[in-house]
Image (cartoon, helix red, strand yellow):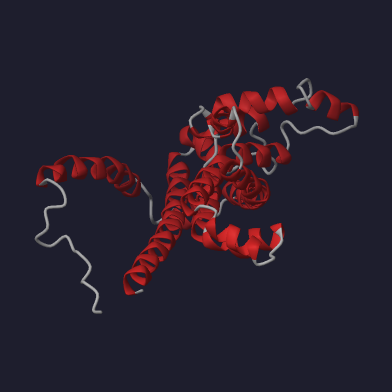
């Protein structure tokens, strides 16, 4: 049987026209600051500003720490999301709320929490200090701070996809003799792969832009803990042109990240809808 053509917005009143006014205002609120930033860039000096010793040190440190924190987010976040999506017990809502709390906590609060947990006199840090291990105000502290704020992004994205997908395909795999590991890797995660990729990319972007928790827990030591956001903050008073140039670099990276995460997920969703209509 021939399939009906997909509906389009042309001539179809999906939404009132007056919604365009607040929609445009909302878009302007986001776009105008980015345009304003771009108009302040000293383009003739841009290459020199982003290749200074301080800028390169900050960029290199951010690249290393974001790579490590993103790896930690995947290693810890995927099992956590699977457990949250598949386990049900009394108090699970409380557990989920606590795990996702960094999404809404002020970063400086997270930094204080990390300091009181892993600092030299902290809950765990005091014991680590006795073993000769210091975490606060080191590069490791930067990685932990980035992981703390970025982990919920992956967990939130992946858990939602797992819950929406359900367990019917996992049940079928189990009846066919697949073990738990095979079911997880070849059924569960394959079906939510777009959400996993999008969550990982967004977590990496959040880690790259982390400022408050890093400053509170790791400090600002050039080449050790001073990432790009911290370098921008310091340069804001000393050299505004350098701060604007580095800010633009972060904006470009953020736009690329969002395009990759959102665009990929949208293409996969459209492909699934199209395959569903053709079947």
Question: Residue 266 in the image: x percent, y percent?
Answer: 38, 60
Q: Is residue 259 visible?
A: yes
Question: For the view shown, which residue lies furthest in the top direction?
Answer: 121
Q: Residue at x 85, y 34 (%)?
A: 133
Query: Which image quarter holds the C terminus?
Result: bottom left
What is the x, y in percent for residue 30? Answer: 30, 43
Residue at point 47% right, 32% down?
Answer: 237
Q: Look at the image and tell me in which quarter the N terminus lies.
A: bottom left
**How far across and how far down the image is residue 59, in percent?**
59, 50
Q: Quadrant of residue 255?
A: bottom left
View extreme (front): residue: 175
Given residues 101 and 118, the one toward you in this image is 101
Report the side of 62 relative to 26 (left or right): right
Q: Residue at x 76, y 22 (%)?
A: 123
Q: Is residue 112 left or right of residue 243?
A: right
From the viewer's perspective, is residue 186 above or below residue 82? Answer: below
Viewer-proximal residue among 145 and 9: 9
Residue 26 in the image, given as x and y percentages of width and height: 25, 41
Figure disc tally: 0
Query: Does residue 130 appear left or right of residue 153 in this picture?
Result: right
Residue found farthest to the right = 131
Q: For the point 24% across and 75% down, which residue is it? A: 3
Give the quadrant of residue 110.
top right
Image-based side of 134 in relation to 181, left or right: right
Residue 228 visible, this orientation: no
Residue 82 versus residue 111 in the image, above or below? below
């Amino acid at each position: 049987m021939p399939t009906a053509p997909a509906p389009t917005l042309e001539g179809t009143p999906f939404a009132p026209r007056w919604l365009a006014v607040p929609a445009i205002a909302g878009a302007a609120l986001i776009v105008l600051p980015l345009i304003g930033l771009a108009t302040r860039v000293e383009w003739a000096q841009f290459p020199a500003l982003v290749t200074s010793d301080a800028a390169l040190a900050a960029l290199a440190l951010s690249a290393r720490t974001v790579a490590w924190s993103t790896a930690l987010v995947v290693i810890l976040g995927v099992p956590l999301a699977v457990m949250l999506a598949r386990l049900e017990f009394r108090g699970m809502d409380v557990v989920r709320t606590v795990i996702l709390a960094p999404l809404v906590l002020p970063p400086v609060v997270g930094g204080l929490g990390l300091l009181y947990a892993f600092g030299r006199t902290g809950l765990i840090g005091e014991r680590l200090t006795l073993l000769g291990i210091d975490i606060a105000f080191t590069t490791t502290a930067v990685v932990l701070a980035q992981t703390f704020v970025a982990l919920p992004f992956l967990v939130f994205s992946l858990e939602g996809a797992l819950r929406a997908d359900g367990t019917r395909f996992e049940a079928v795999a189990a009846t066919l003799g697949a073990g738990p590991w095979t079911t997880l890797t070849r059924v569960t995660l394959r079906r939510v792969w777009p959400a996993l990729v999008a969550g990982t990319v967004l977590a990496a972007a959040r880690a790259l832009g982390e400022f408050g928790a890093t400053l509170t827990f790791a400090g600002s030591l050039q080449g050790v803990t001073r990432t790009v956001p911290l370098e921008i903050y310091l340069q804001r008073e000393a050299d505004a042109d350098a701060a604007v140039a580095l800010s633009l670099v972060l904006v470009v990276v953020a736009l690329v990240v969002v395009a990759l995460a959102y665009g990929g997920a949208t293409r996969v969703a459209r492909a699934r809808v199209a395959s569903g209509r053709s079947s």
